[in-house]
Image (spheres, rainbow, N blue to C red):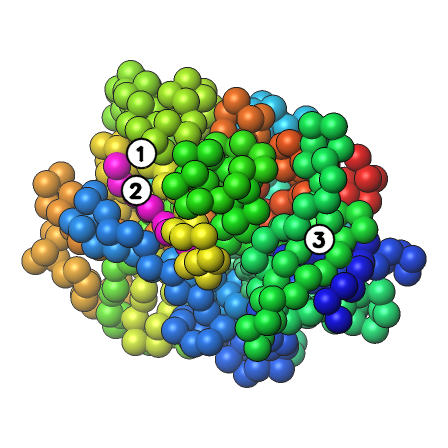
Amino acid sequence: QNEVAFDYVIAGAGTAGLVLANRLSANPSVSVAVIEPGDDVREDADVQTVDFLFSNFNTSINYQYPSVTSRALGSRNLTYRAGKAWGGTSAVNGMVYIRGDKAQYDAWEELGNRGWNWNTLFASYKKGEHFIVPTQAQVASGVTFDEAFHGKAGPLDLGFPLSLSNGSYYAKARATWEKLGVQSIKDLNGGAPHGFVTAPMTLDPQAAVREDSARAYYTPAEARTNLKIIKGTVKRITWGKDAGRLAVADGFEYVSPSGTMLEVRAKKEVILSASAYRNPLILEGSGVGNPKILNKLGIKIKVKLPGVGESLQDHNIIAMTYSLKEKFLGRIPYATTPTAHDVFGNNTASIASSSLGKIKEYAKQLSTTFDGAISVNAIEKRFRVQHDLIFKKNVTVAELFPTNTGDGILAQFWTSMPFSWGNVHLGSKDAIESPVIVPNIMATDFDVDMLTAVGRLSQQAFATAPLSDLVADNLTPGYDTLPLDASDDQWASFLDGNVLNALHVVGSCAMLPVELGGVVDEKVKVHGTRNVRVVDASIIPSQLSGHTMAPVYGVAEKAAVIILEGK
Ligand SMILES: Cc1cc2nc3c(=O)[nH]c(=O)nc-3n(C[C@H](O)[C@H](O)[C@H](O)COP(=O)(O)OP(=O)(O)OC[C@H]3O[C@@H](n4cnc5c(N)ncnc54)[C@H](O)[C@@H]3O)c2cc1C
C-alpha cells in the first residue's frame, strides 16, 4: 500500500488536475494517479445548481484561507477561497467563462515563454470546448455569439443559462453602455473582449447542471483502469538521485484521510495542480524555494528558486447593491469590459505618463515587499509590459458584472491588472493546509485611481437612462456615503473599507525565466528539476482580464500536450 507506482502522479483533482488526468490517461498504457483531499461532489445538489449565489461558501467543500492583515486596507484581512472537491474550484465558482485579451496572452511569450501566445491558447481553448448553440429564446433575451470562436467537439460544456432574465434589463443596460461609449459586441471570447455582452458559462443549459472539470473531464475517463483518484493531501515531493545538476522527483509523500503518512511513486513525473495557494507550500516543503525562507523554516534546500510563492496577482473587487423598481427572474450574466480610455476618458494620457514615471518606484516597493526575492529590475520589466498592455495595446482593464439577487442587483466591478502583487508561503514546516497569504492589494496610487475610476463608471451606468429607469435606490453604500460626485478622498476611504480580493488568483509559480522571478519554464517544468511540472492558475505569469477558470482550462490543455511530448 505504501509503494504504489504510476507513470504520472498529480497533486490535486481540481480544474487543471482533471484535464491532465483525462489527457494523460487517454493512452491505456500510461498510468496516472491523482491525489486529492476533497470528495466526489458530482451529485451534490449545492454543486449542481446553476443558480450560483455563493451557496458553497463556508461549507466543507470550500477552503477559507485568511490573509495576514494589510495596512493598505485599514488593517483588515481578506479571505481567499477555493474548492476542495473533485473539480476543485470549478465545482464552487461562478461558472462565468471569459478568456481575456489577445495581447495579454502574447505578453506571456514576450516575457520569455516561447509558444505561449493567443494563437496557441485559442487552439487549446477550442480543443477543450463543447459549445452549446443558444436557443432562439436565449437569443431573444440578448445572447449573441460567434461560432468561429468556439470548439464543438471538446469535453467542456459551455452555454448560456436557460433562466436568462426575460425582462428589460438586458436592453436597458445595453442602451446605457452604448450611450456611455461602450459598444455591444457579439462574443467576448475571440481575444477582443472590449464591450458589453452576455457572458457564457460552464453549464449544461437543458439539464441546468454545473459543468465542472469533474463532470467534463473525469466522468468520460472514469472507467479507465489506468486512472485512479487517491484520497489524500500531498505533503512533499520525494527525491531520487539527481541527474547532473537537475533534481529528480520519484514521487509524493501524502497524508491519508486517517492521518497516516503514505508514499506514492512516480515512474515518470510528478505534477502539481494543487492551486496557486498550495503549490508553493508543496514546493517549499520539498526544499524548492527561496533559501532565506527555507532556512528560516528549517527546510533543507534542494533547488534554490526565489520566485516560489511570489507575485501572487488577483483582481481588486467591490460590490454595490441597488434596489429595482421591477423584479427580474433569472440570471443576468452581462459583462461590460472597458479599456483605460473608457475608464479615464480625457485623463488617459496624463495618467499613462504619470504612472509610467512611477513604475520604477512601484517596482522598488514591491521588491521590498518580497524581501528582495525578485529584483527591482525584473519587476520593473514585468510592470512595463503590463503598462504597455493597458495604455499602448488598449486591452480591457476592468469588468463590471451585475448579479440578480432576486430583490435587486449586486453590482460588482473589478480592476484586472493591478500593480500591487502579494505572495504566499509556508508558515511552518508542516503547515501544508495553511498558506500564509500577504495580499498587498491597493499598495500603489495607480491601483486606487483605477478602481476609483471604474467605480465611478459603475455608478454612472446605474444613473444613466434607460438603465436608471429601473433603479429605485443605491442601497449600499448609499448615495449619502458615496454620492455620484464623491471626492477622491471619499472614494479612497470607501475603498479602504470595502475592497476585496476577487478570488482570481494567479502567478505564485509563474511561468517565466528565473531572472524574472519564474518558477516553471515554458515546458511547465520547475527550473532546476528534471521531472516536476506545475499546471494550474499558479503558472499564469501575468493577469488577464475576465476570469481565471477559462485560462486554466486552456493552459491545462496545452500543458497536457507538452507533457505527453516528454520534453
Ligand atoms: C467563489 C469563487 C468564484 C469564482 N468564480 C469564477 C467564475 O465565475 N469564473 C472564472 O473564470 N473563475 C472563477 N473563479 C476562479 C477560478 O474558479 C479558479 O481560478 C480556477 O478554478 C483555479 O483552478 P486551479 O486548477 O488552479 O485550482 P483548483 O481548481 O482550486 O484545484 C486545486 C485542487 O487541489 C486540491 N489540493 C489542494 N491542496 C492539495 C494538496 N496539498 N494535495 C493534493 N491536492 C490538493 C484542492 O482540493 C483542489 O481540488 C472563482 C473562484 C472562487 C473561489
Q: Residues within 10 Å of mark 3 (few under 14, many from 20)?
A: many
Taking the spot 82% from the left edge, 39% from the top edge, the residue there is 566
Q: Residue 103: name its quadrant.
A: top right
Compare residues 557 and 188 and report the one nearer the observer. 557
Q: Are marks 2 and 1 in contact (CB under 8 Å)?
A: yes
Q: Is residue 441 above or below residue 65?
A: above
Kindly state the secondary structure of the residue where label 3 is placed: strand
Q: Is residue 405 above or below residue 511?
A: below
Residue 381 in view, yes or no: yes
**How far from the left and from the top, in percent, is residue 228?**
76, 68
Q: Is residue 213 above or below residue 440?
A: below
User: Magenta stretch containing residue 271, yes or no?
Assistant: no
Among the two numbered marks 3 and 2 on one chain, the one whose residue lies closer to the N terminus: 3
Q: Is residue 274 above or below residue 87?
A: above
The image's mark for residue 91 is: none
Q: Which residue is mark 2?
A: 440
Q: Is 98 left or right of 448, judged from the image as shown?
A: right
**Amino acid type at mark 3:** Gly
Q: Is 342 left or right of 565, judged from the image as shown?
A: left
Q: CA distance from mark 2 to mark 1?
A: 8 Å
Q: Which residue is mark 3?
A: 251
Q: Residues within 10 Å of mark 2 (few under 14, many from 20)?
A: many
Q: Is 86 left or right of 72, judged from the image as shown?
A: right
Q: Is 259 left or right of 425, judged from the image as shown?
A: right
Q: Which residue is mark 1?
A: 369
Kindly state the secondary structure of the residue where label 1 is placed: helix
Among the two numbered marks 1 and 3 on one chain, the one whose residue lies closer to the N terminus: 3
**Amino acid type at mark 1:** Thr
Q: Which residues are magenta?
A: 435-443
